Amino acid sequence: MKNPFQKNTGSEVFFKTPVILILILGVIITSIIISKGGLIITLVLIVLPGILFFLNRLFNNPKFGMYAVIFAAFTANGLNRYFVDLPFGLTIDIILVLTYVAIFFKEFYRKMNWSPAASDLTFVASIWFAYSLLELLNPESLSKMAWFFAMRGVSLYMFLMIPLVLMLMNKYRDLNFFLYLWAFFSIVATIRGIVQLNFGLDPWEQGWLDLGNYKTHVLFGKLRIFSFYSDAGQFGAAQAHAGLVGTIIFLHAKKTKEKILFGIMAIMGFYGMLISGTRGAMAVPFAGFFLYLILTRNLKMITIGTLLGITVFIFFKFTMIGQGVYAIRRMRTGFDPNEPSLLVRLENQKKLRVYLADKPMGGGIGSAGNWGQRFSPQGFLANVPTDSWYVMIWAEQGVIGLALHLMVLFYILGRGAFLSMFNVRDPVLQGKLFALTSGILGIMAASYGNGVLGQLPTSVLLYSSMAFIYLGKKMDAELSV
């Protein structure tokens, strides 16, 4: 006879008739939905349990949303090649908004403490976002829908991300986890690039090339590697960014495991830069290491670093060493002032200068580049390549927008350099903040040649870096306890 006090196990529930009938009914309904709805509905049903789990974790711990943003920043563009009809590009927007909602409900019965986000960094990000909102009134703008899509990368992510990092990721372990995630994805990205280089592309990647992207990604019969990023330009700059940050952290790390991890990140990052064939990415290490040497205030390191930089410049500019290697040959053209693509860019800038002469607020956000081609192909800016991030800002938001944007960036850079130099005593933490600060200038420099600053994953990494630099003093106090 069964003991009446014995508890039923979870598996015994499935042997009860009502439950079996419900499961059978659920299978039938699901089968009908899949047969009627097609691939998209099938995918939704497959990922639904994962979405429910994510929402559970997010509303229990809003910090989980920030981890998800970093994951999405690295993977969204790659996934779009395999699932063309799914809007992975909006994933980050949705997660950021949901994270704010999660904070609200978590603090529902308490007064929300916004003080960690009360920073001049948040203030200048808000000013830049406010100007983007003002661009809605720009009489030259041809499409409000283009404004919505383009504005996200230009200012919205910066406006939403910085307060969240300041509020949710303000511990030293959060900085470390952020850097570990960055290292992991950057290493995996280069490994994927190595596979593309040596074993070729998969059918979906080849399909992406066949859409017309081969024009910029197959030069002289050589493939420019793009890994799972949006394009080779973004891959090259992002990997140069990773190489720079990894190298500086490696130089300051004390723990063996960190030396190994960030050493690998540095090597793989710079190798990824080389195989991308992205010449503008070289600005990242040149500008970044220059700032790093200044931040160290070490005359010996400044001297050695300067000599090393001059040596690298002479190698590419005045020698033909390694010319038989495609990656070196491609990078060397970046030092040629008569390089054809550079002359074309300068000619396009002359056209823009004439067009923008009487348009101090530009032609409207989203009027140039891919968004312009998609939403207002008849517009002048949609048919003149901008190439550079700053040229794009100038074209779309005018000389006023460009001046404001540069002031915001240089203020954050200058303030961040001051904070990391004078407000932090722990040498390992300071090294990590030096790496992030140098990375900001490196990306700013590379953005003159390519529109990398507002693309994924670079924008998410950059805005997070800004917030972590501002948190340096708090983390230093945490470590000194």
Image (cartoon, helix red, strand yellow):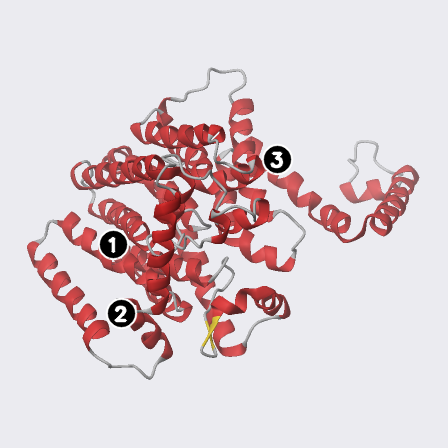
Residue at the spot x=48%, y=50% of the render? 369
- Mark 2, residue position: 336
N-terminal of the two: label 3 or label 2? 3
> Marks 1 and 2, Cα distance to the nearest angstrom?
21 Å
Image quadrant for the C terminus? top left
Which residue is nearer to you in this view: 360 or 324? 360
- Mark 1, residue position: 288
In which image quadrant can residue 7 be found?
Answer: top right
> Local crowd at mark 3 within 10 Å, few (<14), some, or many (≥20)?
some
Q: x and y percent of residue 197 in the render?
A: 48, 75
Whether residue 355 is situated above or below residue 314 in the rendered picture: above
Which residue is nearer to you in this view: 385 or 166? 385
> Marks 3 and 2, Cα distance to the nearest angstrom?
55 Å
N-terminal of the two: label 3 or label 1? 3
Q: Nearer the viewer, mark 3 or mark 2?
A: 2
Please indicate whether residue 332 sits to the left or right of residue 84 in the image.
Answer: left
Q: Amino acid at mark 3?
A: Asn
Q: x and y percent of residue 325 in the render?
A: 34, 81
Q: Nearer the viewer, mark 1 or mark 2?
A: 2
> Local crowd at mark 1 within 10 Å, few (<14), some, or many (≥20)?
many
Q: Amino acid at mark 1?
A: Gly
In which image quadrant can residue 16 be found?
Answer: top right
Q: x and y percent of residue 86 in the render?
A: 66, 49
Residue at the spot x=40%, y=71% of the render? 275
Q: Secondary structure at mark 1?
A: helix
Please indicate whether residue 384 sits to the left or right of residue 125 in the image.
Answer: right
